[in-house]
Image (cartoon, rainbow, N blue to C red):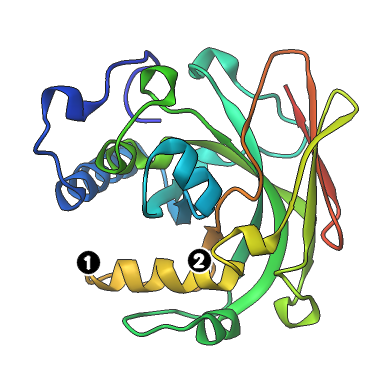
Amino acid sequence: MLGTVSERAPLSAGWPELDVDTAYAIQDEALRQRRARGETLIGVKLGLTSRAKQQRMGIDAPLLAWLTDAMVLPAGAPVPHDALIHPRAEPELVFVLGRRLAGPGVTAATALSAVDRVYGGIEVIDSRYADYRFTLPDAVADNGSSAYFSVGPVGVEPASLDLSLEAALLEVDGQIVDTATGAAVQGHPAEALALAANTLAARGLALEPGWLVLTGGMTDAVPVRPGSRLAAHFSHLGSLTLAT
């Protein structure tokens, strides 16, 4: 989230000429302010990597956003509802980079070779825009609706799995509400990782060793309500639960 915890109309409602490049400049300035407050940059996330989700949101391209250490939700820590507006959660595949990955021209195979471990995770998103209605530049300027995320306990070498077939089940209050495989993320999550590297390259940046990369929601995001029990179960990457 950027700034205060109150919803607002999309920036584009009063600034129709807002474009993606300007939105990324806004995003970068927000990161500068976070770092000035003492937060540490620890990686990036991709948003709207699922074609189905793009169609539902009326957006035709994925986006990239920054992750800092202040966004990490440790295991067992409650979701801080007083700092959020209308949080939602979704399961993700999370890469930890073993070496620097710089574009342009990064392929999925090249990207995957730079990964040390892959984990299951849950991201809590929280758009500052009313009713989650926004254009692509709006979403970029809002740092991809980033709020918090948790990473599961099981990390494996990506070569040991077919990540396109790695399944995630999203559970709310004991009921499975959605399921998907890694193929929902750009066909393969390594394609999302390559996209991140190539997108950063256009801005003169790269993915750095040790960074986390959240590759995008595998299922629809579900509301996070106080007192509910929300969990994600992965085929080979274990399970994790949000304390809501």
Q: Quadrant of the C terminus?
A: top right
As drawn, the residue found furthest toward the right would be 174
Residue ID for mark 1:
203
Query: Would you say 28 lies left or right of 59 here?
Result: left
Left or right relative to 12: residue 227: right
Q: Earlier in the sequence, mark 2 or mark 1?
A: 2
Q: Which of the two marks, 2 or 1, is nearer to us in this view?
A: 2
Against 103, residue 210 (above or below) is above
Distance from Cα at disc 2 to Cα at disc 1: 17 Å
Give the tally of numbered discs: 2
- The answer to which quarter of the image holds residue 226 is top right
Report x, y in % for residue 30. Answer: 27, 39
Residue placed at 85% from the left, 23% from the top? 173
Q: Residue at x 27, y 18 (%)?
A: 9
User: Residue 45, image x and y in percent?
Assistant: 48, 53
The N terminus appears in which quarter of the rendering? top left
Q: Residue at x 61, y 69 (%)?
A: 188
What secondary structure is found at the residue carrying circle 1? loop
Q: Residues within 10 Å of mark 1 (few under 14, many from 20)?
A: few
Residue 30 vs residue 37, the one in the foreground: 30
Instruction: Say which mark, if any, is on residue 192.
Output: 2
Return the mark for residue 130: none
| Above or below, comparing residue 122 to residue 3 in the picture | below
